[in-house]
Image (cartoon, rainbow, N blue to C red):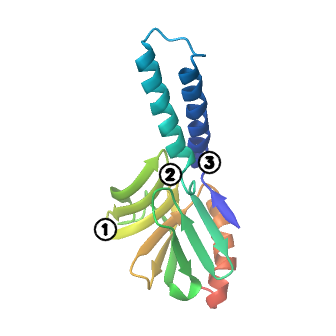
Amino acid sequence: MSFTFPVMKAITIMGIAEIVLGLLLLLGLLRSKGSLVARIIGGIVLIAFGILFVGMRNTGEIRLEEGRIDLLVPFQKDKSIESADIRSVKAVDTHESTGMKPVRKLSGGNIGDVRTGWYRLESGEKAFLTLEGPRALYIETRLGFNALVGCSDFEAFEEAFRELVLEQRGGE
């Protein structure tokens, strides 16, 4: 079962649109008052950014499989957490839980309510985020990192996580 961030899908669509606009600009099908050189450079830049957005290896996804959770975020190495590597799990609201609010981005991205990558939490702890909205599961692991994971349909995500991942280690 997987949960994909719709904002990230929109970025992929935007990348396709940029490639098309770049090609139209290069082919001269879009009229512009600029010189031919400016049109060529503009077209190349649009195409390059379009390829960057479309070429992202993944577009922000939380994948749940039996006994495992995979965190797939753009421009970061994917993180996989096996159920045996989980120390504890607790549901938190990042706006209300003391110390759980992401306060500084270390390496990652944020668009709207979506935050992915490495962040410093209010408590000072460094955590890997795959998060859309304020509600999340705080996953303490034995792998040298902890994660804050959540999506817009948090109730369905939490239920699926507990069934597919935690049941493999005897519940939580």
Q: Tell me which amino acid carries mark 2.
A: Val
Q: Is residue 86 above or below residue 63?
A: below
Q: Tell me which amino acid carries mark 3.
A: Pro
Residue, disc 1 = 123
Quarter of the image where the N terminus is located: bottom right
Residue lying farthest to the bottom in this orientation:
170
Count of labels shown?
3
For the residue pair 128 and 26, the one nearer the viewer reads as 26
Q: Determine the image quadrant of residue 94.
A: bottom left
The 10 Å Cα crowd at callout 3, few under 14, some 14 to 19, many 20 or more, is: some
For the residue pair 21 and 69, the one nearer the viewer reads as 21
Quarter of the image where the C terminus is located: bottom right
Q: Residue at x 62, y 90 (%)?
A: 169
Q: Determine the image quadrant of residue 128.
A: bottom left
Q: Is residue 91 above or below residue 117?
A: below
Q: Secondary structure at mark 3?
A: helix
Q: Is residue 43 above or below residue 166?
A: above
Residue, disc 2 = 114
Earlier along the polypeptide chain: callout 1 or callout 2?
Answer: 2
User: Does residue 138 appear to the left or right of 66 in the view shown?
Assistant: left
